[in-house]
Image (cartoon, rainbow, N blue to C red):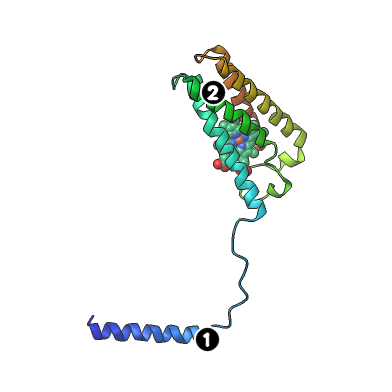
Amino acid sequence: MSKKIQIITALTALTVLGVALAQTPPAAPAAAPAGPTPAERAIEYRQAVYKIVAGNFGPLTQVAQGKADFNADTARKNATRLAQIAGFVGDAYPDISKEGKTRALPAIWSNRAEFDAIVKDFNTHTKTLSDVVENSSSAGTELKAAVAAVGNDCKTCHEKFRSK
Ligand code: HEC
């Protein structure tokens, strides 16, 4: 394409665009900036809580399964954080977070007592795990049992209250 044709093409395009713009009706009043709704925010928050749960429990299961070496400082850090974040789980289910891009099943809200009982176990078992790790110098039987108890809570809750 010659320079001249290129320029003419560009000018034509601009003219067409200009006409189109000129015919555009006056803009509607600016809409509120798009952002997450309160429901979306609540769901994202909950999922973030579980990411932190998993991020701290994962290394402890590795240790319990002999796939990673026991390191007292790391294990203590993970177990302490897990016990703390477990306390956020029960509060992460406000009514507005029932519907949306979530795997949380409606049964959580219709069967709250059973759900809360698992949350309570989860808090008890993560606290126990934290105490056991505090007094451990290796991945012994007690530590393995404490990890298993927490893992069982994850599994119980997921099977009953989380969609596939
Ligand atoms: C009391 C119930 C309950 C317990 C206990 C629980 N979970 Fe979950 N978990 C859920 C539900 C429900 C969801 C779905 C959340 C959503 O999509 O809004 C979920 C989601 C997750 C997710 C996905 C988060 C994401 O990115 O969307 C991970 C990872 C996870 N759980 C790991 C764990 C681990 C590991 C444990 C145990 C250490 C655990 N959970 C304990 C109920 C539970």
Horizontal and vertical percent for residue 78?
A: 54, 27
Q: Residues within 10 Å of mark 1 (few under 14, many from 20)?
A: few
Q: Quadrant of the C terminus?
A: top right
Query: Closest to the observer: 160 or 9?
Result: 9
Q: Which mark is residue 41?
A: none
Residue drawn at (61%, 77%) of the image: 28
Q: Is 160 left or right of 20, judged from the image as shown?
A: right
Q: Which mark is residue 76?
A: 2
Q: Quadrant of residue 52?
A: top right
Secondary-structure class at tag 1:
helix
Residue drawn at (60%, 39%) of the image: 49
Mark 2 C-beta closer than 8 Å to ligand 1: no
Up the image or down, 39 lies above or below 150; here it is below
Q: Which mark is residue 23?
A: 1
Horizontal and vertical percent for residue 76?
A: 54, 23
Query: Closest to the observer: 11 or 154?
Result: 11
Q: Is 86 left or right of 19, judged from the image as shown?
A: right
Q: Residues within 10 Å of mark 2 (few under 14, many from 20)?
A: many
**Mark 2 or 1 closer to N-term?**
1
Three-letter residue code for mark 1: Gln
Horizontal and vertical percent for residue 105?
A: 67, 42
